[in-house]
Image: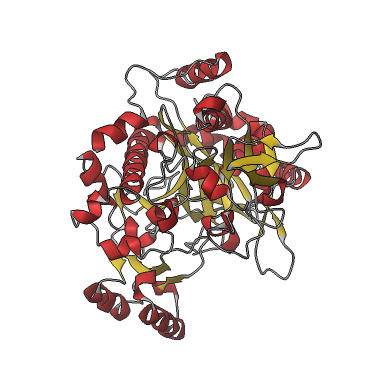
Amino acid sequence: MTLFDGYNAASFYDEMFEASGVPRSHYRRLFEKLSQMSVADYNARCHLADLTLVNQGITFAVYGDEQGVEKPWPFDLVPRIMPATEWEPIERGLKQRMTALNLFLHDIYHEQKILNDKIIPRDLILGAVHYRREFVGANPPGGIYVHICGSDLIRDSDGTHYVLEDNLRCPSGVSYVLENRSILTRVLPNLFQHLPVRPVEYYTTQLLHNLRSLAPLSRQDSPTVVLLTPGVYNSAFFEHSFLAQQLGIELVEGRDLFVDDNIVYMKTTRGPKRIDVIYRRVDDDFIDPLVFRSDSALGIPGIVNSYRAGNVALANSIGTGVADDKAVYAYLPQIIKYYLGEEMILGNVFTYLGSDPSQLTYILANLDKLVVKATNESGGYGMLIGPQSDSKTREEFAEKIKSNPRNYIAQPLISLSTAPAFIDDHFEPRHIDLRPFILTGQDGVTIIPGGLTRVALRRGSYVVNSSQGGGSKDTWVLAAETDPLDSKNGAALEAEVSGESPISSQQQTMSEKFESAQ
């Protein structure tokens, strides 16, 4: 007997096994190693991983849970593996999306050419919850609006990858990518033998490089960067503190900062210290009580004026949320074509818009077949999975849609791919997705190979969010045989240490892309 006895992915695309039950070629060595382990041995490794998670405080918060706020992060030890040939088009597709989305944001806050040319309905953008009229005409450094993005990818039953959504405001989860890799190398080091797994640890070095480059020109020599958190009760506070520590920057709350004469300062025991760049994990609504929500105690009064004056940089920029509106997502093929003159590399899931009367009629008539989502919700909230719902729930959701059609989109239920997860004393297939993390800087777009593979640990569930009972896996992208594992990233890291820019002659800067698109 092995841990895989009885494993059956049914009609779903399984990441590890072919339909015949034979392991895929890039999983064969991993399968062999796991098959040699006993239940007791594997359980011991799981227990060691859990102890590590608890001792390091690797947790997340579930709002409204009466049993407690902090939960240990659910980590499944079987990694998800992607060969180089599979990762390469994903990487190209994500870079294409980020380039187009940054151009789109620059346009809608300036000339609005795409609206004037009627590629996207004007009221869909100007009426979006996260469109910030206060930011029209403002110029972020280098024209870059989105510096950190986490896009969610899924694989359908035929093996095709789709982007389900782009998270452009305060995407979370990268700390778990780094910690998952660290823990797995300690509790199951033998799994890495004979497999050329590409590293992910350089993420923080690249991020810090990008953040420093955002500083005002007069402050480029020695910029001060901080990470702004809402505080300890935020669901992603562990990530905030982890990233600040890894980046070597101060973790601050709004009360630690103040603005004087359009300059942002941090309070210290030695007096005020000027701040040049803020990696913010506070949403637009709460960032400045003088401009947005006046009751916010999380932000810094006057920071928007300081930002508009060019005295401080924010990552991500104010107003990026309009581009991850799920109704705007439906227009990504047109956005890419308009700004880049290219066809979309990574496809979207077909999307019905509640704002379109004819599509609204179809949505309401087919709630039992569709997945309906609120356009600005996240974390698995505000969603109806029609095929798994009862008639009463669908009737209640229909009333919500009718009361505010613009706030809803619908999509067919995609048969998410599965991967082995350890349940009790054996492996069972569970649905997964993938959130790669994309960094955009003055010298281009960088994507760490892999990302956060999220797992719907509840049997039959399609909801992978941690707040809804999901967990995660380490994600392995294998290097191509002709590509030395660390050659590209090693050069970038050396350049970072020496203070030189790791820009190759083949790279086109983001600034040049913006100029060429105007």
Which residue is at 33% across, 60% downward? 125
Q: Where is residue 74 in the image (x, y as percent from the top left)?
A: 64, 52
How many numbered markers are drawn?
Answer: 0
* Residue that sits furthest to the right in the current view: 269
For this view, does 225 lie left or right of residue 102? right
Relative vertical location of residue 172 with respect to residue 397 in this rendering, above or below: above
Relative vertical location of residue 441 with respect to residue 124 in this rendering, above or below: above
Q: Position of residue 343 (x, y in %)?
A: 21, 43
Q: Where is residue 348 in the image (x, y as percent from the top left)?
A: 31, 53
Q: Where is residue 205 in the image (x, y as percent from the top left)?
A: 57, 27
Identify the colour scheme used. secondary structure
For this view, does 345 lie left or right of residue 423? left
Viewer-nearest residue: 4 or 168: 168
Which residue is at 53% across, 26% downward? 218
Q: Which image quadrant is residue 9 in?
A: bottom left
Relative vertical location of residue 372 with respect to residue 226 in this rendering, above or below: below
* Residue that sits furthest to the front in the current view: 261
For this view, does 134 lie left or right of residue 192? left
Relative vertical location of residue 479 with respect to residue 424 in this rendering, above or below: above
**Whether residue 179 can be seen here:** no
Image quarter of the C terminus: top left
Viewer-nearest residue: 312 or 497: 312
Viewer-nearest residue: 217 or 489: 217
**Whether residue 512 can be seen here:** yes
